Amino acid sequence: MLKWLAIVLLVLLALLQYRLWLGEGGVGDLGEVRERVAALEAANKPLRDRNARLGAEVLDLKTGLDAIEERGRSDIGMVRADEHFFWVPGVAVEAMPVVNPAPAVSLEAGR
């Protein structure tokens, strides 16, 4: 009786080991899933960085007047009344996002 029980338990252990190492969802599949996760993380990193930059720009536009002025100047060519605008053909200027460390509340409080 104990001999048969030992044989059944050994066979069960062998089947479980087979499923662990070679079966579906085993160690081999785990390695493939980890590789896919690493590839997707690498693909998502530039997108996360872009989203962080856009989030900072949105926050700056919501809180700072300087960013709104800079956006107006670069996108639609706004010029103040006391300024002169000179357009030079053939010269392209890339607009860099401006990050305003001081929120608009502190600017208003100082006035």
Image (spheres, rainbow, N blue to C red):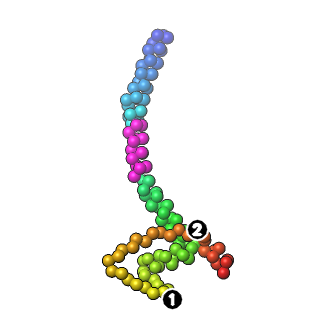
The image shows residue 24, relative to residue 91, as above or below, that is above
The C terminus - image quarter? bottom right
Q: Which mark is residue 100?
A: none
- C-alpha gap between disc 1 and disc 2: 26 Å
Q: Nearer the viewer, residue 91 or 17?
A: 91
The image shows residue 50, relative to residue 6, as above or below, that is below
Disc nearest the viewer among 1 and 2: 1
What secondary structure is the stretch in magenta mostly built from?
helix
Q: Which residue does the image show at 50% across and 70% down from the upper left? A: 98
Q: Position of residue 95 (x, y in %)?
A: 43, 71
> Mark 2 or mark 1, which is nearer the start of the sequence?
1
Q: Position of residue 13 (x, y in %)?
A: 45, 22
Q: Position of residue 11 (x, y in %)?
A: 42, 19
User: Regarding mark 1 in the picture, which secondary structure is present there?
Assistant: loop
Name the residue furthest left: 90
10 Å crowding of disc 2: few (<14), some (14-19), many (20+): few
Instruction: Please tell me in which quadrant of the rendered image residue 21 appears.
Output: top left
Q: Which residue does the image show at 52% across and 65% down from the upper left? A: 56
- Range drawn in magenta: 30-43
Q: Which mark is residue 101?
A: 2
Question: Label 2 is placed on what type of residue?
Answer: Pro
Q: Which residue is mark 1?
A: 82
